[in-house]
Every structure is written in structure tokens, then in C-alpha cells.
Amino acid sequence: MPVERILATQEATDLIALTREIARRELAPAAAEAEENEKFPREKFDLLGQAGLLGLPYPEEYGGANQPYEVYLQVLEEISSAWMTVGVGLSVHTMSCFPLAEFGTAEQRRRWLGEMIGGGTLGGYALSEPHAGSDAASLRTRAEPDGQGNYTVSGTKSWITHGGVADFYTLMARTSEEGIGCLLVDGLSPGLSAGAPERKMGLTASPTTELVLDGVPVAGDRLIGEPDRGLSIALRALDSGRLGIAACAVGLAQAALDLAVDYAKQRSQFGRPVIRFQGMEFLLADMEAAVQSARAAYLDAARRRDAGRPFTRQAAVAKLVATDAAMKVTTDAVQVLGGAGYTRDFPAERYMREAKVLQIFEGTNQIQRMVIGRELARD
């Protein structure tokens, strides 16, 4: 059943209603087949762009909707409950736009941001490398100055969502021995290529690839912020990106819970629906509590962000709590369905496979615990 949401404005209420209609009519019916065939649904992102959902938290002057993060995340949750690949893709795209929107010059934003958030292009976020996952500061991709104010970029990025299909990449590269820069790289740049998609256990319709840069020319005006501030920009983007993943996780968990409740109402054993057995009641109650607690965690962090308050610790808590909840709730949904849950006739097994990666990307949950602990020590 639809989640009851308390929204502050009629505009936000209308956005949720629009999102639910798109999710019900366009996303949910197509998800299973596309995941089975590993077919990237680019047309669904075009649809989201046409509906004005690709730039919700960004300024209206550039084609965004100027919505609070609290509203954007609830839209993201609704999309993820219908199709996780599209929800994660929207979260990654939004994070890829963040450095330009937050740290770009007025001229840079005027030139590129409108197209990025208006639905004309799709972004990828290129930070990780084969040897630099959790330790982002050890990246080796280099952006060498060419003496003309431009850069030549060489190296390999890994685990890139939308690798090979993105129109642009927000990419971190070493600009000096001590410094890392943030570059906006065109997806059709010469010398840029994507590897074969990773063979993943879930999110199979979303391409994840290596990104190889072999002397890629990047104009100097595509450097976002100072040449040595890229890592701090990347970490700021990840704070917001973790909230996106938390919202995706809650959407997935909600979908699994709804499936489990519906099945338990319809399945009868010993003369009554299985939802009437205390063991099943307790299991479903714990699933509901986990979903609602996770939702409250990401909304709290989002409200702090919207108020201009520090939210790094709260974002890490939300990502940790929500993704762990998604893993448990989807696993329990398979248990509720019993043998049927282990088959592909129901989406429960897909939900469980998709939940696992949420505990890994945008910083593993072990890294979230480190962030939380360090923030507590700092406080």
C-alpha cells in the first residue's frame, strides 16, 4: 500500500503523486524483464527528465525544482520501491551533478548545469579505482597540465555506475603529488572507453564498468573548484549521496515488506491466513519497525542538510541503518514466501540480491562506522 507521507507543501504532495503514477505505470511493470535481460533502461531516465525529476534539489534558474532534500529523497524512495536500478541511477546522477552545482563558477553552471539536471544528459561518478576503493585518497589517475591551461588525463576508474552509457562523468584525478582535482569529463571524449559490464548478482540492468582514460584531453574550464580540492569535494558529494542510497534502501525494503504482507494475507495454512499466526505477526512487525526506523533516520539527516547544519554523521547513520535494514527485510521477505520466495516467479529473491550492494557502495557499512566514530570523537 502507498506510504502515508506528511509533506509541507502542495507542490511536494503533487511531486509524490506524479512519481507514484510514473512508478506504477512505467517502472514497476518493466523491471523484472529488464533485470532478467540485463537491459539498461535509458528511456526511463529520459522520462524522469521530461517529468522534471532529474534535478529536484537544484536551483530553478538552471532547470531544477529547488526542492528540499527531504522531498527529493522521498521521491527517490518511491522510485526505488518500483525499480531499484532506476532509483540508484537517479541517486548517482544527482550526486554527479553536486560538485558543479555546489562548487562550480557561475559561468560553469550556466554552460553545463541546465542540461545536466534538465533531463538532457545522464551522469556518472568516477572516484573509485582498482586499488583505491575505501581509501579514496590513494587514487592514481593523473590529470597532467599540458602547458596551455588544459589537462591530459590517464588512468583507470572502477565500479562506475552508468559506465559506457553516461553522457558525462564527474571524475577525481591527481593534479599533483599532493593534490586531487575534480573534473567534468564528456562521455564521448577521445581516449575514454568503458570495459565490459561487471557480472553482478543484482542490479543487472544497471551497467557497472571500469573506465579507462588513455590521454583524455580535458579543457581547463572543466576543472570544478581549486586544483587540489577535489577530494574534499568528493567527500562532500558522498555525504549527500549516502542519503540517496539510504532512501533507495528504504524504498526497496518497503517493496519487500508490501510483498510479504500481501502474500501472508493470501496464503492459508491450517484453515487460516498465515498472517494470523503469531510467529508471522512478529516477523512482519519487526520488518515494519525496521523500515520506519530507517525512513526516520534519512529524513532526520535530510532536514539537517536542508537547514544548513552539519549532517555528515547523520548521513552515515542513515546509510548504515537503512542498508542493513534493507538486507534483513528482503531476506525475511523471502522467508515469508517460503519456497515461492526462492523462485523468480516472485520478486522477493531479486529484492534480496539487490539489497546486498547497498551495504557496499557509497562507502561500505564498515566505513560508515568509522565515519560515525570519528565524528563522535570530534564532537
Image (spheres, grey):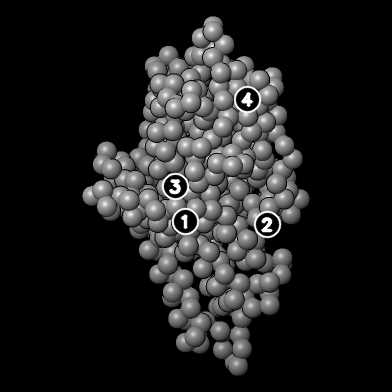
Q: Residue at x 64, y 51 (%)?
A: 203
Identity of the residue drawn at 55% across and 78% down:
265
- Tag in front: 2 or 4: 4
- Residue bearing the label numbered 2: 201
What amino acid type should be assigned to the residue bearing mark 2?
A: Met
Left or right: where 98 falls relative to 90: left
Nearest to viewer (mark 2 / mark 1) = 1
Query: How far, Cα to Cα, is label 3 from label 2?
Result: 21 Å
> What is the C-alpha distance between the residues marked 4 and 3?
28 Å
Reply above or below: 12 against 297. above
Mark in front: 1 vs 4: 4
Residue at image coords 50%, 46%: 134
Question: Which labelled disc corresponds to residue 365?
Answer: 1
The residue closer to the viewer here, 286 or 367, is: 367
Q: Which residue is mark 4?
A: 154
The residue lying toward the viewer, choosing from 212 and 92, is: 212
Amino acid, disc 1: Asn
In 3D space, how far apart are the residues under numbered discs 2 and 4 (Cα atoms)?
30 Å
Foreground of the two, 64 or 23: 64
The Cα–Cα distance between marks 1 and 4, rounded to whole angstroms, is 30 Å
Tell me where residue 179 appears, x and y as whole percent: 45, 26
Residue indicated by mark 3: 242
Which of the two labelled residues, at mark 1 and mark 4, occupies the earlier sequence position?
4
Does the residue at mark 2 contact the one at mark 4 (Cβ under 8 Å)?
no
Q: Residues within 10 Å of mark 2 (few under 14, many from 20)?
A: few
Mark 4 and mark 3 lie on one chain; the one further toward the N terminus is 4
Q: Earlier in the sequence, mark 3 or mark 2?
A: 2
Residue at the image point whose x is 64% and y is 20% from the top: 216
